[in-house]
Image (tube, grey):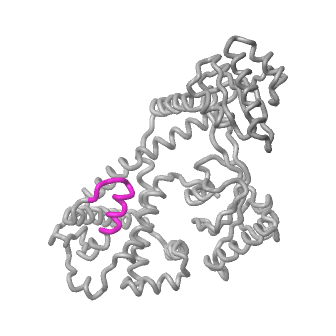
Amino acid sequence: MVTMPCLKIRSLLAWTLLAWTLSAVAQAPTTSRAMGRDFIVAVVDSVPITNHDVTLRVPQLRDQLKQQGNSVPEADALLKVALERLIIERALLEFAKDTGVTVDDDAVDQAEQRIAAQNQMSPSAWQQKLSAEGISAARFRQNLRDQLTLQRLTERNVPSRIKISDVEIDQAVRERQAANSGNNPDIDLGHILITVPEKATAAEVAALQDKAQAALARVKRGDDFGVVAKEISEGAERDKGGLMGLRPANRYPTLFVDAIKNLQINDSILVRSGAGFHVLKLVTQRASQVLTITQTRARHILLRPGGQLSQTSARARLADYKRQIESGKADFAKLAREHSEDGSASDGGDLGWSTPGMFVPEFEETMRQLQPGQIADPLISRFGVHLIQVLERREAPISERELRDMARSSLRDKKFDETYQLWSQEIRGRAFVEYRDAPQ
């Protein structure tokens, strides 16, 4: 498993790759009606753009604008925007041809198989659906090839244009540290626990609450917290004078953190939990000096379709593995050692501890949604088909180098859209564009 050089590229162009095909299938007019009103609306370097091309692009554009939270223009304006998008796309494809950027048939085959699988279909069933909607297999594959070409062209040209200075990284690091300090301060709490038995009667609960209220009153009038804790607390920190120790707020129970949120240093409060009554005292609070990041330890089984193993068969086989594991009939690590085609197979599929951004987006998104112990349904990525299980998660300190790398990556993502727009407009400016009849 490897990380993508720029996640922004993949997320942006993956949308285009899938959105055109899906919206075309959902919105395509019948062939006879489309051909009856088709005409050329623009020419880019001798390549025509037809009215049909524009009307096919409009549903995708509308959906994209909605997803981004932008307003959707009126019909005529939307047609003009779709036309401009197509003009830029054609100019980029001509530039790709001139600079030798190509996509082979194998890459197109894999993309088509991924789209079919994401629609829960076999490749043949997907092609039948396209045919029923009036979209030829040749046209569909050509659009896949075009979008993959645009992806490769962008990967080759845009990242190198994004410039990030050390000054910008320093500022981003300072902002992250400031934000973290406010959201996750280091705190030390004093804790007195009065437990409530599971089957306590209402009278017993009331008596225990009175005991806790009395302890709180003693603390508030100035009695030594440690003395009170040693006398009556049933908590594990009783012999430490009730002190729970200085630690980041996210390592305390959320109930405790929420309860002391508005307290001043040395103030106390009484809260109730399922365990009983808690007298809490805010002993220390300071900005955290250590930034942490959530790390995930996961394992997977990877099957690479090819030869006699189709993508559909790989998904079915991994789904069967999942059923066997969840029913207790098979062991994940043993199946990984026997069947996985990844380098982690010898370790039972264990990928070790990972930080966000280490894996390709589709793998990482699925992994992020799993709770420890859960197994996802088979996932398709550019590497093959995966069965993923999350083993555990932890908060780990971020080194200075990791923090700067994260800041640099975040800045790249923020600058990507602007850089892409400037570059694509530059390529469009070099192309010969002739407008014909307005799209309808």
Residue at image position (30%, 81%) is 29
User: Is 54 situated left or right of 205 in this image?
Assistant: left
Vertical arrangement, residue 401 with respect to residue 219, above or below: below
Q: Decide whether the magenta segment is chiefly helix, strand or loop.
A: helix
Q: How many numbered circles does the render carry? A: 0
Name which quarter of the figure residue 68 lies in.
bottom left
- The image quadrant of residue 267 is top right
Apparent side of residue 299 relative to residue 357 in the rendered image (left or right)? right
Query: x, y (%) of residue 90?
Result: 31, 66
Q: Residue at x 80, y 62 (%)?
A: 333
Which part of the image, by quadrant, shows the C terminus?
Answer: bottom left
Q: Give coordinates of residue 232: x percent, y percent.
A: 82, 23
- Percent position (x, y) of residue 238? 82, 25
Query: From what the image shows, is residue 392 above or below residue 61?
Result: above
Q: In this rendering, does residue 401 appear at all?
A: yes
Q: Position of residue 136 (x, y in %)?
A: 39, 84
User: For the point 57% across and 65% down, which residue is it?
Assistant: 382
Name the residue: 51% across, 43% down.
Answer: 409
**Image side of residue 210 versus residue 407, left or right:** right
Read off the magenta span.
Answer: 58-72
- Quadrant containing the N terminus in the rendered view: bottom right
